[in-house]
Image (cartoon, rainbow, N blue to C red):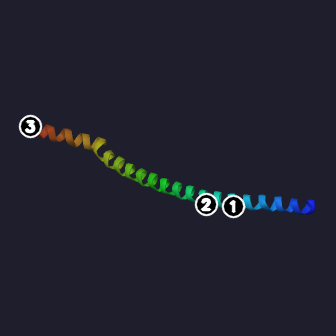
């Protein structure tokens, strides 16, 4: 065997190894991407829920609600 043949065999072996490693890495990156998508979807749903809760709480903490509550108490004491 000539040295060139040995070099071709070594290089092709490394090429096959790197090809296999790149396929494995691509599969792992796809899995991680899917997990990140799931996490962001969950975070988005949670943010939407919190936003709805804040809107609901804002209704009860506004000045109009406070005045309405005070007026009810005043009417109860007068009546």
Please name the residue that numbered disc 3 is placed on: 78
Q: Residue at x 42, y 55 (%)?
A: 45
Given the current orientation, which residue lies at the most extreme front position?
1
The structure residue drawn at horizontal position 87% and vertical position 60%, both measured from the top left corner, is 6
Please tell me in which quadrant of the rendered image residue 70 appears. top left
- SS at badge 2: helix
Mark 1 surroundings: few (<14), some (14-19) or many (≥20) residues within 10 A: few
**Up-down relation of residue 14 to residue 79 (above or below):** below
Q: Around disc 2, counting alpha carbons within 10 Å, would you say few (fewer than 14), some (14 to 19), or many (20 or more)?
A: few
Say which of marks 1 and 3 sits in front. 1
Q: Secondary structure at mark 3?
A: helix
Q: Residue drawn 60% across and 57% down?
A: 28
Pointer 2: what residue? 27
| Quadrant housing residue 26 | bottom right
Give the residue at mark 1: 20
Are discs 1 and 2 less than 8 Å apart at CB? no
Work out whether residue 14 or residue 75 is closer to the camera in this orientation and state it. Answer: 14
Precedes in sequence: disc 1 or disc 2: 1
Using the numbered discs, state the Cα–Cα distance from disc 2 to disc 3 in whole angstroms: 75 Å
Does 23 sit left or right of 77 as displayed?
A: right
Q: CA distance from mark 1 to mark 3?
A: 85 Å
Q: Quadrant of the C terminus?
A: top left
- The residue located at (64%, 59%) in the rendering is 24
Is 52 rendered above or below residue 72?
below
- Rendered location of residue 77, percent (x, y): 9, 36
Mark 1 residue element: helix
Quadrant placement of the N terminus: bottom right
Q: From the top left corner, tell me how far across and down residue 2 is, in percent.
A: 93, 62
Left or right of 13 on screen, residue 45:
left
Position of 22 compared to 45: left or right?
A: right
Q: Earlier in the sequence, mark 2 or mark 3?
A: 2
């Amino acid at each position: 065997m000539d040295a060139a043949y040995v070099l071709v065999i070594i290089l092709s072996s490394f090429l096959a190894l790197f090809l296999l490693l790149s396929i494995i890495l691509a599969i792992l990156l796809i899995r991680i991407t899917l997990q990140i998508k799931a996490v962001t979807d969950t975070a988005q749903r949670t943010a939407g829920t919190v936003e709805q809760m804040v809107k609901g709480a804002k209704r009860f903490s506004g000045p109009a609600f406070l005045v309405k509550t005070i007026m009810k108490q005043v009417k109860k004491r007068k009546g």
